[in-house]
Amino acid sequence: MPFATTTTNTILFLAIFILAFFPGAFYHLIRLPLVPLGYLTYSTQSSTALSPTPTCCCCTTSTPHTSTPIPTSATSEQTSTMSWFQKTFTLPSKSRGSYLVTDAVVKELPELKNYKVGLLNLFVQHTSCALSLNENWDEEVREDMSDALDRLAPEDRKGSLYRHSAEGPDDMPAHIKSALIGASVTIPIKDGKLLTGTWQGIWYLEFRASRHSRKVVATVQGERV
């Protein structure tokens, strides 16, 4: 005979089915009769009130975890003393030769005293002279340097060495010498002074036979005092 389905069996089957596949729904279903009594509201409030304050896993107390704020770029800019400075000045007019101009440069740049640490770049705005760092004691070194450069790039009296001669026989050799030596030097700064070696000095090398006025751009970047 077929098994007689009763109301009790049906309810029991549905309860097992819900419990197996929908445990969350079963939990809320059995708590539904308690809602009119206010138990559910009380229980929810109590669990909220009694829940512990979240803490960091590495803390030994219940004090809420707080993180140390990281300085922003604006804060870094406020505390930074880095600055740039630029100035153009003219070197003493000279004819062909090598000249020590360290004192003249320092005299033109009293702003160097304002820098605790930094760099000074000197750039000459011409193509027939040069700047260099070299011997600052024996002037014969500068004379020998000029003679050596004359041998490397001699004047072309016969017109057989260079094509460019529109500005005189000394012009093209001057361009060659300028390319060999260079138009700029960079010197470190410490406590308001140039950090050159004991025997180092700033050279201005003029390669034209007649006197010329030469402009130099000085750029300083560093930390101010």
Image: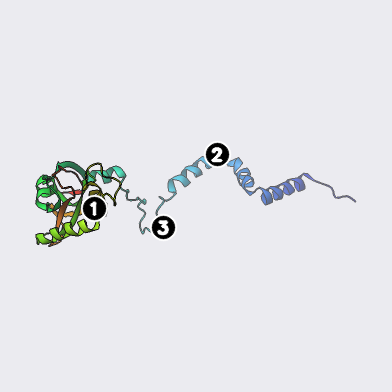
Pointer 2: what residue? 37
Say what secondary structure mark 3 lies in. Answer: loop
| Crowd tier of the residue under label 2, counting other residues whose Cα lies within 10 Å: few below 14, some 14–19, many 20 or above | few
- Where is residue 205? Give x, y as percent: 17, 52
Measure how far apart labels 3 and 1 are at the Cα level.
Answer: 71 Å
Identify the disc placed on residue 119. Answer: none
- At x 17%, y 41%, the residue is 88
The kind of residue on which mark 3 rests is Cys
Measure how far apart labels 2 and 1 are at the Cα level.
Answer: 103 Å
Q: Quadrant of residue 86?
A: top left
Pointer 1: what residue? 177
- Where is residue 117? Give x, y as percent: 18, 53
- Where is residue 138? Give x, y as percent: 9, 62
- Where is residue 50? Give x, y as percent: 43, 48
Front of the two marks 2 and 1: 1
Front of the two marks 3 and 1: 1
Contact (Cβ within 8 Å) of mark 2 with mark 3: no
Identify the disc placed on residue 57. Answer: 3
Q: Nearer the viewer, residue 131 or 114?
A: 131
- At x 60%, y 41%, the residue is 32
Position above or below: 60 against 87: below
Say what secondary structure mark 1 lies in. Answer: helix
Q: Nearer the viewer, residue 55 or 9?
A: 55
Q: Nearer the viewer, residue 221 or 156?
A: 156
- Image-based side of 61 in relation to 135, left or right: right
Instruction: Identify the mark nearer the N-term, 2 or 1.
Output: 2
The kind of residue on which mark 1 rests is Lys
Instruction: Identify the mark nearer the N-term, 2 or 3.
Output: 2
Instruction: Identify the mark nearer the N-term, 3 or 1.
Output: 3
Say what secondary structure mark 2 lies in. Answer: helix
Residue 80 shows in this picture: no
The kind of residue on which mark 2 rests is Leu
